[in-house]
Image (spheres, helix red, strand yellow):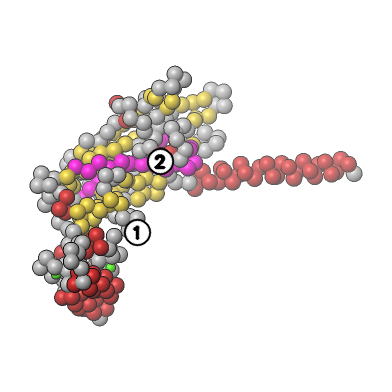
Amino acid sequence: MKKTISAATAALLAALSALPLAAKAENYDTYSPTFYFRANSAVLDEKTGDTVILASDIPEEGLDLRVDVYSLDLSKRAFWISPKWKCSDPLIKLKDLYDPSTGDEIYAYSTLKEDGTITNNTYSVSIRTDDNYNTMACSVIYQYYEPQTKTMLPMIPYCDPTDQYPLTHFTASISSELTYGYHTIHFLTEAEDYADQRVSEANLYREDGTSLKRDPIVEDMTIRISGIEGDVNGDGFVDSSDASDVLVEYAALQTGQESTLDDRGRFAADTDHDRIIDSTDASNILVYYAYVMSTEDPVSFLEYNN
Ligand SMILES: [Ca+2]
Ligand SMILES: [Ca+2]
């Protein structure tokens, strides 16, 4: 009897201890790292995720915006992280891609040495910029075979989570000719410029050392060139005639008719930037107009709505 219980207990223990391992292995098989951008010197609209730049802040010679590229790998099983990205608008030129292995800035896969200094050369880094297609790529790779366990090992990130430091950064050089509206820097997830163009990828090792190629989750960057919101007719004022234009547009869209506005007008009419022109936008304009009428020194429409 005693023997039976202990066998049952052993079987139960074995089943329990196998559970977390099995669950972990399953996670790695379906896990994808996430690649995303951040421009820390520009305003991030938390609601829409847009990076906001006022057109009036872009000087004649253009604006250089530093953009950091992040990789979030919660599995910490990656041995090959490779984001590739592109801007299809020639008025946003991608330049000055930083190679972390050539500098001493801490990056996502920096290593702390025994003497307390940092090295960026534990893993091999390669970067590429194609001015023609306005694309960039940065790969960090580790190919290390651990003789004792006879497995390939993943990279050890500098911090956990891995996106406390960027993987790399570059400059988005924004021309002053760029018009009001939404402009995107996007990760390449399919060939766009030529048939065998490489796309973003992440490769992970399973516990047993076999590799797993994953399509990363990507979060593109939308740059919103802002400053005319509310002034739908472009006369320099935000007033009831703009609200009326919004309502006319809203009615046209609701009844399946053609838009009554041009691109500039449609951007100005969408006052809350939800990409929809409706009565909320008209209401925002009327509320602001009432405020302007009752205030000595009113702030701008954008400031008022922040
Ligand atoms: Ca107006
Ligand atoms: Ca709207």
Relative image position of residue 133 (x, y in whole percent): 20, 44
- In the shown orientation, is residue 168 left or right of residue 157? left
| C-alpha span from label 1 to label 2 | 21 Å
> In front here: 294 or 53?
294
Q: Residues within 10 Å of mark 2 (few under 14, many from 20)?
A: many
Q: Which stretch did the figure color magenta?
A: 64-88
Q: Quadrant of the C terminus?
A: bottom left
Q: Amino acid at mark 1?
A: Lys
Q: Residues within 10 Å of mark 1 (few under 14, many from 20)?
A: few
Relative image position of residue 256 (x, y in whole percent): 24, 78
Q: Is residue 183 visible?
A: no
> In front here: 101 or 212?
101
Q: Which mark is residue 47?
A: 1
Q: Amino acid at mark 2?
A: Asp
Q: Which structural element holds mark 2?
A: helix
Q: Residue at x 53, y 22 (%)?
A: 147
In the rendered image, which quarter is residue 141 located in? top left
Q: Residue at x 52, y 25 (%)?
A: 146
- In the shown orientation, is residue 212 left or right of residue 272? right
Residue receiving disc 2: 163
> In front here: 253 or 29?
253
- In the shown orientation, is residue 21 left or right of residue 192? right
Q: Residue at x 26, y 44 (%)?
A: 41
Q: Main secondary structure of the magenta part?
A: strand
In the rendered image, which quarter is residue 125 located in? top left
Q: Residue at x 22, y 77 (%)?
A: 247
In the picture as drawn, the residue positioned furthest to the front comes out as 296
Labels 1, 2: front one: 1
